[in-house]
Image: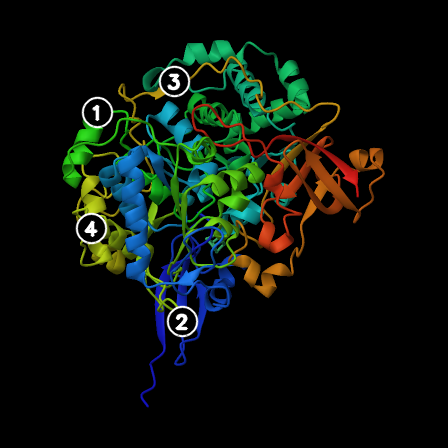
Amino acid sequence: MTRRPEESFKTTCSYCGVGCGMVVKKDRKGNITVEGDKDHPVNKGMLCSKGMNLHYAMQDRSDRLLYPEMRYSRSHPYQRVSWDQALERAAAVFKSITQTYGPDSVGFYVSGQCLTEEYYIANKLVKGFLGTNNIDTNSRLCMSSAVAGYAKTLGEDSVPVSYEDIELADCFLIAGANPAWCHPILFRRIEAHKQANPDVKLIVVDPRRTQTCAMADLHLQITPGTDIYLYNAIARVLIENGEVDYDFITKHTEDFEKYRDAVFLYTVEEAALNCDVSVNDIRLAASYIAASKGFLTLWAMGLNQSVIGVNKNIALISLNLITGHIGKPGSGPFSLTGQPNAMGGREVGGLATMLAAHRSYANPAHRKEVAEFWGVPSLSEKPGLTATQMIEALERGELKAIWIICTNPLVSLPDARRVEAALKKARFVVVQDISRKSDTLEFADLILPAAGHFEKEGTMTNSERRISYLNKVMDAPGEALPDVEILCRFANQMGFDGFKYISTGDIFEEHARLTKNTNLDISGLTYQHLKEEGTVQWPVPQRGHKGTPRLFSDHQFFTPSRKAKFHALDNPQNLSEPVTSDLPLILTTGRIRDQWHTMTKTGKVNKLRQHIDRPFIEIHPHDALLRNINDGDIVEVDNFRGSVRVSAKVTDDIKKGVVFLPMHWGKILQNDLARANNLTSNLVDPTSKEPDFKFAAVEVRKY
Ligand code: SF4
């Protein structure tokens, strides 16, 4: 018997948007282990607990979907079928529904975990060939407010900075994020930089005292939803003290006066009262920013997942603009991405409201350009349904069929009971996933087994625009196929031209060609380049180009005037559902250190369950005392949408009047008793359509 040689492969972690490089080693028996890639510019050999244990999640195949299954009605049992039978049925149903009800009667809901090639093919299939813009992604739930915030201020969805700016900054403002737990390797870099340079200032804005606050110089523990008051008040102090960069403002921005007038509508004292922080702390934050040579603002879901998420983004980015801290070393706004490839998805236009390479579906010239490129007569000018709009359309019976890829909306979308009812109404639900533990399978008419991370090749883009090539390390189990192959086979079954690729590299090159002459031009990039040269940050407009670590160094922004744009945020008020005497507490949700999303991967790993092994709710001692709740008591949290039952963690780490639930646990893992989204609000930001996960009115009672 010939023994296989040991092998090693370079790839990227599949969890958060930090995008750490890892080396996967495969022994002679085919067992794999992972270690941090010492040569990788992001993590320089480090991995966090999730990354370090990724091989356990990928090697445990006990829950894997192994072959296609379908049922002819919800009362029939599933039966195993061949890929041909499965895709023939899918094509027959999609043809019948679209011919009867039109192309907008079907939709696709994909994921920030999809590789760029998968995203590209799904968008080409839906927008180019099915003739609808009804394709949205779970990135809608995390990054769409940042996308709109960048577009409104800088002209386009563009993260201007790099991780290398961390070591060049001397003031960090981290808002609505807990990177110590959720973006650990990036935070290790901030920690190491601050330890080596004690004068570096760290300001944290969060209603919770998280691990990120442990090394903060200033923690602004604001009331949820009051961010705009805070950032406007900091701006007011900077303007009053003459600590803004008027030269930059005059030459490179527009509408500063309107912004300044709005900022001056509220005094610092009024803002402090609204935010429930002290005036002195607001002035201290402003003084840290004023004294800095490099100022980075970093944020995540606390800003984005809000009914006023876009305006929160604009208010924070404006602090970089008034101080001229953008386009120079150690400075700029930096949204932290929750998923590994949310950025790659945006590059291919993977949202219902975008087209490839940040083009807009609403722009006729952009539609024409993309249609010609794909060889189709035209693209629909009708806006596609966003994630929560698809649920509403299913409820109304307008959306008849939905194809769900690599995401678990029954746990992750707000108001989960409503999602259940909507999926129950759907005529046809396709679930394409790797795990039998996805709660959404309960409603599937057709189950398609997909290959997982390490089991396919492709590319991803991390939070700093860094594109990496992912090697295939091992074969998928059973009959599972890479998502691109499933989608291309379906497209061929539908009779669409343009989906007969010889390799995944061809798909990447097609995507890269479509970016030519845009602001994210990667037309110079190929798999060969990525394999030989390693990761690279877009734009990469020519062969041999080394990539672009920092945008806007020339202060030429992506707006028509080439100037960054201020906005008058004259109504900083939160528009979330109000708390009432019956529902007096504000529920906010988030992640814990060692789990990721709906736990279909991290939940399998013993080592990761040891950190926190069960769901809980954080409640302030004052609120607990009022309700006779002691630490460890089982409590029921409820509102008019639903309830959960978990144990209480009584702690003054959470602000009085606010409670916190982790978002990971779903029905399969906890029998519906701990699904945070039983309670969350279905309000969304009017521009980004991102849900208001961070603010729901609830009551908590001892059970
Ligand atoms: Fe993976 Fe994020 Fe941890 Fe890096 S920080 S190892 S990308 S989970």
Element type at mark 4? loop
Q: Secondary structure at mark 3?
A: helix
At x 80%, y 37%, the residue is 624
Q: Amino acid at mark 3?
A: Ile
Dot placed on the residue nearer the N-terminal end, 2 or 1: 2
How packed mark 2 is, by other alpha carbons closer than 10 Å (few <14, some 14-19, many 20 or more), is: some
Of marks 4 and 2, the one in the foreground:
4
User: Picture coordinates of residue 668 (x, y %)?
Assistant: 58, 54
Whether tag 3 and tag 4 are in contact, CB under 8 A, the answer is: no
Distance between the Cα atoms at labels 3 and 4?
Answer: 48 Å
Q: Residue at x 25, y 42 (%)?
A: 124
Image spot of residue 417 (x, y percent): 58, 39
Name of the residue lying farthest toward the bottom: 1
Between circles 2 and 3, the one closer to the viewer is: 2
Label 1: state its secondary structure: helix
Tell me which numbered mark, 2 or 3, is placed earlier along the sequence.
2
Nearest to the observer: residue 98 or residue 176: 98
Sequence-wise first label, 4 or 1: 1
Q: What residue does disc 2 label?
A: 25
**Badge 4 or badge 2: first in the primary sequence:** 2
